């Protein structure tokens, strides 16, 4: 089973954004040493506690400090951007780092309504146009623009020897069917969805038509925290759980709180229910427990790859979690 990493570049209280981004580099380097297949970094805008609004800036920084692990966006939020510019950026990355670049595409705003308005005009219209924009992007990536079209006159130069691999990220049958129709690899975000991915992934496999990807490929993205003991893992996970509560309320810590601060946070009855719901979607435990859960997910949903998101207060705890999982499974 292949394992990969999704990094949201979390900022802990007491950290600077630069500290967090340097930790992202260290995480990618650690992933490469352990044998993880790929490392993706996410795009978020003006969200307290997350440091990366521009994967296309971080990826060359990380690529230059690693040598073989695949690196990519998780995801480029396409409704904010013109497909041609996105193709140029990722073709350039693929030219610099041959055979290593993924271009994950999403349609979420990545921030508040105010941020969305600051980033782009007519965001909702662009979401509605996503299939058209995605098709245009793929034509530029594949350099197969339709004859007679205006885009046939231009190329998203430089054209790399090995094209970036396009992935569509989603949590619905609609996104799965779009990935299948366009012959793209598909990543399902289980960590951010209450939906059972079984039917959604089956729709993808059943409907797949070869395109940029010749055979269907799928990733299941999960949230996991691993420590030497279950008790340690549950304590470490508390910071992430409380930070998510705070994010939902738009209040509190500017970054991921310490375990001590998380323990002191006063939870309401609704908060307690939210925490329990979040824990049901997470994998929290010691190495053997986490391994068992990941293998079960892999078998149940027939995903080709499991991608792991881990957010902790301590950067050392985050690295250790990935190390324990990697040593147990890779």
Image (cartoon, helix red, strand yellow):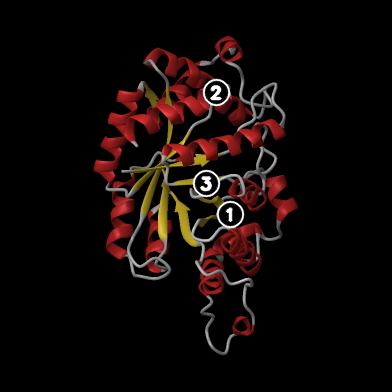
**For the point 37% across and 21% down, which residue is it?**
285
Q: Give yes or no for contact between labels 1 and 2 (Cβ–Cβ under 8 Å).
A: no
Q: Tag 3's secondary structure?
A: strand
Badge 1 local density, few (<14 within 10 Å), some, or many (20+)?
many
Task: Name the quarter where the C terminus is drawn.
Answer: top left
Query: Residue 171 placed where, x, y %?
Result: 43, 48
Q: Label 1 vs label 2: CA separation?
A: 28 Å
Front of the two marks 1 and 2? 2
Residue 223 position (above or below residue 204): above
Badge 2 local density, few (<14 within 10 Å), some, or many (20+)?
few
Residue at numbered disc 1: 76
Q: Give yes or no for contact between labels 2 and 3 (Cβ–Cβ under 8 Å).
A: no
**Residue closest to the far bottom:** 148
Residue at numbered disc 2: 316
Residue 178: which disc? Answer: none
Q: Earlier in the sequence, mark 1 or mark 2?
A: 1
Q: Earlier in the sequence, mark 2 or mark 3?
A: 3
Query: Residue 96 placed where, x, y %?
Result: 60, 60
Residue at numbered disc 3: 40
Residue 140 lies in what quarter of the image? bottom right
Badge 3 local density, few (<14 within 10 Å), some, or many (20+)?
many
Q: Label 2 vs label 3: CA separation?
A: 19 Å
- In this view, the residue in front, 169 or 166, is 166
Total number of numbered discs in the rendering: 3
Q: Label 3 vs label 1: CA separation?
A: 11 Å
Q: Tag 2's secondary structure?
A: helix
Residue 97 position (above or below residue 244): below
């Amino acid at each position: 089973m292949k394992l990969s990493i999704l990094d949201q570049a979390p900022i802990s209280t007491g950290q600077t954004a630069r500290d967090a981004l340097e930790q992202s580099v260290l995480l990618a380097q650690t992933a490469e040493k352990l044998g993880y297949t790929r490392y993706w970094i996410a795009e978020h805008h003006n969200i307290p506690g997350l440091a990366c609004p521009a994967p296309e800036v971080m990826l060359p920084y990380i690529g230059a400090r690693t040598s073989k692990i695949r690196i990519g966006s998780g995801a480029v939020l396409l409704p904010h951007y013109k497909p041609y510019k996105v193709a140029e950026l990722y073709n350039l990355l693929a030219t610099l780092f041959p055979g290593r670049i993924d271009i994950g595409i999403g349609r979420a705003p990545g921030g508040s309504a105010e941020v969305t308005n600051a980033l782009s005009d007519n965001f909702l219209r662009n979401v509605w146009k996503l299939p058209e924009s995605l098709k245009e992007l793929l034509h530029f990536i594949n350099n197969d623009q339709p004859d007679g079209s205006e885009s046939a006159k231009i190329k998203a130069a430089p054209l790399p020897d090995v094209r970036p691999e396009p992935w569509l990220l989603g949590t619905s049958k609609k996104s799965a069917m779009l990935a299948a129709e366009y012959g793209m690899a598909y990543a399902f975000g289980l960590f951010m969805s209450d939906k059972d991915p079984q039917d959604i992934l089956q729709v993808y496999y059943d409907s797949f038509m070869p395109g940029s990807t010749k055979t269907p490929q799928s990733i299941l993205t999960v949230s996991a925290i691993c420590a030497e003991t279950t008790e340690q893992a549950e304590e470490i996970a508390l910071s992430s759980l409380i930070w998510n509560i705070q994010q939902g309320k738009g209040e509190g810590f500017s970054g991921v709180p310490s375990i001590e601060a998380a323990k002191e946070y006063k939870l309401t009855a609704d908060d307690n229910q939210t925490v329990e719901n979040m824990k049901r979607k997470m994998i929290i435990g010691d190495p053997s427990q986490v391994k068992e859960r990941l293998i079960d997910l892999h078998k149940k949903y027939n995903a080709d790859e499991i991608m792991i998101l881990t957010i902790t207060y301590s950067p050392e705890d985050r690295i250790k979690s990935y190390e324990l999982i990697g040593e147990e499974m890779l």
